Image: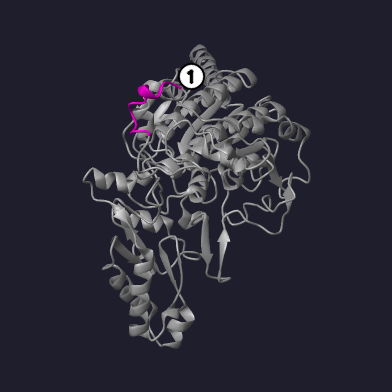
Amino acid sequence: MKKYFITSLFIGTLLLVNGLTAQKKNKDNTSDDLLRVKPKLVVGIIVDQMRYDYLTRFYNGFGDDGFKKLIEQGFNCKNNHFNYAPTSTAPGHTSVFTGASPSTHGIIGNDWYDKEIDASVYCAGDDAYTSVGTSSNAGKMSPHRMTVTTITDELRLSTQMQGKTIAVALKDRGAVLPGGHTANAAYWFHGADEGKWITSTYYMNELPKWVNDFNSSGKAQSYKKEWNTLRDIKDYIESGTDNNLYEGKFKDEITTSFPHNTAELLDKTKAFDIIKATPYGNSLTADFAIEALKNEGLGKDEITDFLTVSFSSTDYVGHMFGVNSKEVQDTYLRLDEDLARLFKALDKNVGEGEYTLFLTADHAAIEVPTYLKDQKIPAGYIDNKANAARLSEFLKYTYGTEDIVKNHSNNQLFLDHKIVKNLDLNLADVQAEIAQEYLGYDGIDKVYTADQMWNNEYTRGIPYILQNGYNQKRSGDVLLVLKPGFISYNTTGSTHGSPQIYDTHAPLLFYGKGIKPGSTIKRTEIPDIAPTISALLGISYPSGTTGTPIIEVLE
């Protein structure tokens, strides 16, 4: 019996020791797994005004080291959408990096009417700060109107502010908003007659030497040159004719055709803003981003850093020439080469397999309505002047004053609540009456009210998208939705901003450390990006997150 007890005690002790060893081993393995997928650098790329179908339309023209590399070696979310409107630059960049929509993060447009101060405001404008790198006001910017944190903020917080965040874009809002509240630096391009990369005293009091050196290098001047096609234009069969009535022109141009070689493009000393409207603006952005990567020492240690890059020229080119233009096709073929350069720089400076990258857009775009009409597709333009005159008559007849509507901004009407109250009217009733009136106007498809946004929870369709864009403190009283194919814009070039699918369907590609190669046609939404990266990094989600991680993406 004693022998049996001793044997049992020995076996029990052995099992306990083995169990504890296994627990420790599992714990160590878990720790090893977390470290294994932790990248040295996260790179967030936004391509301004990029439709999803640009990936498929121009695929055969791409090289192996740009877009194709992300598609074939990374993860492709083929059914990715913005879940809100307006689909414009500032809300787009903010939603990607906050994991939320404008209803939460507060950036409801590029500009909007601020009903608290009765004035229009700019998404990143901030008179509390001054410009760095220019004597102009172009640097008076900060992210103060963004009410929640970004993924870049959360990474900084999780590393005790040791991980760096650097944000780069031609547009100020394309750098300021992705960089978050805690970025070490955000840089944007000030064209005018200077052609310099600048920043704000929100980040620093003087530019680093490497930025001054870049500005003095003549790089911007080198892109003031003729724009001709990268390849034989006869091979650009995925886009429309070169000379047509659907495209805009540079100043002093007679036709819309290649090559573009106006005096402004060739002048090396002024008019640098024109670079933005050529693919060379993207090349300049890639040049500067690569310099930032090297000179800021990003991805050089075990503490994860973040680089955000927004390629803005695609938006300028799309607005001027339109979705179906040779210019857009050439811009994307050239962007593909710029991406390849950036990826090679990442491989060299951070190391292959040591960084994680995602690429998406801030919105998509509509085909030029004049082109659609010529193809017998319902499309057109809104006569804002006629609609405003008709509304004015209705307001005077119904309420005795047209001042009951204070402002019209981002397809929203803002009412003067004091006048409504003084007239002893019910606000919800006035909203509904004006909505019903506007529904009969040309080019209007649907109209919703703030009262509907407050008292309903929509889960699909246009009202769902509008509600995600509706911010209770900042948005208007009556929300207008234009008919599909209709825009308020020039009769040449493309635009965006609507809740329609041509403005919401945008690419989303993941690549690199911790990313499982593959694809999905399951619907994903822009606010899903930030929590996906948060889950990969093992850090807190941004404070306003409403999206969910895309589990198929992660290893």
Q: Which amino acid does label 1 sit on?
A: Asp
Q: Where is residue 392 in the image (x, y as percent from the top left)?
A: 38, 77
Q: Give the range drawn in magenta.
A: 231-242
Q: Name the residue under label 1.
A: 65
Relative to 16, say whether 315 is above or below: below
Residue at horizontal 51%, vertical 61%? 112
* In the image, residue 146 lies in the stretch drawn in magenta: no
Residue at horizontal 30%, vertical 50%? 485
Q: Where is residue 535 in the image (x, y as percent from the top left)?
A: 50, 36
- Is any part of residue 341 visible from this angle? yes
Relative to 215, say whether 128 is above or below: below
How packed is label 1: few (under 14 Cα within 10 Å), some, or many (20 or more)?
some
Foreground: 226 or 330? 226
Residue at horizontal 77%, vertical 36%? 208
* In the image, residue 239 lies in the stretch drawn in magenta: yes
Q: Where is residue 501 in the image (x, y as percent from the top left)?
A: 32, 46
Q: How is the image coloured?
A: one colour
Relative to 423, say whether 14 is above or below: above
The image quadrant of residue 414 is bottom left
- Is any part of residue 32 visible from this angle? no
The image quadrant of residue 34 is top right
Foreground: 379 or 293? 379
Please give left or right for residue 102 compared with residue 143 in the image: left
Foreground: 30 or 123? 123
The quarter of the picture where the C terminus appears is top left
Foreground: 162 or 106? 106
The image quadrant of residue 20 is top right
